[in-house]
């Protein structure tokens, strides 16, 4: 998702997206440990996605 698409989501949807991203990161780390992860870049992209979602949540709290 792009940042503009994330910004229009409601707080409940943002929380669901954040939870899903954390679960995805857990799965990627598990696959990395068991040497099943092919694309290591997915870890970085998932962490970046989590950071973007957390930033937008914080922006909405301050607004």
Image (tube, helix red, strand yellow):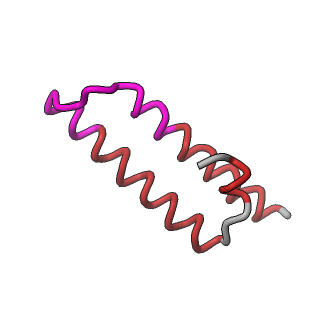
- Quadrant assignment, res 11: bottom right
Check the image and report above or below for 53 versus 44.
Answer: below
Instruction: Give the residue drawn at x 63%, y 45%.
Output: 52
x, y percent for residue 1: 58, 49
Q: Is residue 23 magenta?
A: no
x, y percent for residue 17: 51, 61
x, y percent for residue 30: 22, 40
x, y percent for residue 9: 67, 66
Position of 57 with respect to 42 (left or right) is right
Q: Looking at this rendering, what residue extends furthest in the right direction?
A: 63
Position of 57 with respect to 46 (left or right) is right
Instruction: Give the residue drawn at x 49%, y 34%.
Output: 45
Q: Is residue 37 magenta?
A: yes
- Along the viewing direction, whichever of 54 and 4 lies nearer the viewer: 4
The span picked out in magenta is 29-47
Figure quadrant of the C terminus: bottom right
Position of 51 with respect to 39 (left or right) is right
Instruction: Give the residue drawn at x 41%, y 52%.
Output: 22
Q: Looking at this rendering, what residue extends furthest in the left direction?
A: 34
């Amino acid at each position: 998702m792009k940042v503009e698409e994330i910004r229009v989501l409601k707080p409940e949807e943002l929380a669901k997206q954040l939870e899903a991203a954390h679960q995805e990161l857990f799965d990627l780390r598990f696959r990395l440990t068991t040497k099943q992860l092919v694309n290591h870049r997915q870890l970085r992209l998932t962490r970046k996605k989590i950071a973007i979602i957390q930033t937008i949540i914080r922006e909405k709290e301050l607004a």
